[in-house]
Amino acid sequence: MACNSINGRTYVNTVIPVPGATATDATYVIDLTHYTCGNRKICANGAFPLTSSLGFQVYNAPRAVGNDSYVCDILISGTVTYLPYKYGQNQCGGGCNCPVTENVWAIVSVPVASATVPTLTAGTVLASPTGMSDCCSVTNAMSLVCSCNLATA
């Protein structure tokens, strides 16, 4: 399903370098917010938490900016699956409340200190709803927090 409005899009909130970067690798924590397609409300509980599967790849060739420094554009893409809220039905699971999977993607630019052109390795992903308690309130936004490691060849 394609969404061509603010809903169904993923936004980058922050990109934070993790302390301890070396000349051969750097790690970043990336905080994203995904708004559901069609402004669907999310229903999350212990029986059906949000799930996410994201991958990372260098979007364009890293750009040299001088002094052994590069800027890398990273494409974050994948899916997020959630249980939509159904008004008038047992909020979490009444009727045919089937899981919905949506595409997620964003591009972030990160600096990398390296004497050679950096390459990318995958990180980890956690997904959670934003601003809601366990199936007692609803939201149309979810937070996706992932880590990304850039390493030189």
Image: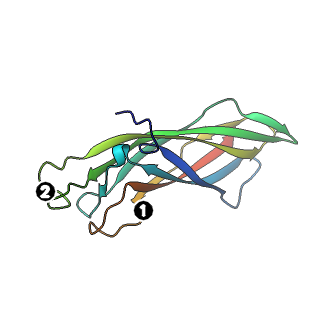
70 to the left or right of 142: right
Q: Residue at x 48, y 38 (%)?
A: 77
Please state the horizontal and vertical placement of residue 45, each as a whole percent of the image.
Answer: 27, 63
Q: Secondary structure at mark 1?
A: loop
In the image, residue 93 lies at what x, y percent? 17, 56
The three-letter code of the residue at mark 1 reads Thr
Please tell me the numbered disc located at residue 94.
Answer: 2
Quadrant in the picture for residue 17: bottom right
The crowding category of the residue bearing disc 1, from other C-alpha atoms within 10 Å (few below 14, some 14 to 19, many at least 20), is: some
Identify the residue at horizontal 34%, vertical 54% (top origin): 50
Number of labelled discs?
Answer: 2
Q: Please state the horizontal and vertical placement of residue 104, each as a whole percent of the image.
A: 44, 41
Lower position in the chain sequence, tag 2 or tag 1: 2
Relative to residue 66, is residue 22 depicted above or below? below
Q: Residue at x 58, y 48 (%)?
A: 148
Q: Is residue 117 left or right of residue 95?
A: right
Q: Residues within 10 Å of mark 2 (few under 14, many from 20)?
A: few
Q: Is residue 40 left or right of residue 141?
A: left
In the picture, the quarter occupied by the C terminus is: top right
Is the residue 78 above or below the residue 148 in the image? above
Q: Residue furthest right?
A: 67
Helix or strand or loop: what does disc 2 sit on?
A: loop
For the residue pair 122 and 74, the one nearer the viewer reads as 74
Image coordinates for residue 96, horizontal then vertical, percent: 13, 48
Q: Quadrant of the N terminus?
A: top left
What's the residue type where badge 2 is placed?
Answer: Gly
Q: Pick the residue in front: 11 or 55.
A: 11
Q: To which residue does mark 1 refer? A: 130
Q: Measure how far apart labels 2 and 1 are at the Cα level.
A: 22 Å
Please give the name of the residue rendered at 40% of the width and 36% of the height, measured from the top-left corner: 3
Based on the displayed image, in which of its 4 quarters is residue 60 positioned? top right
Residue farthest to the left? 95
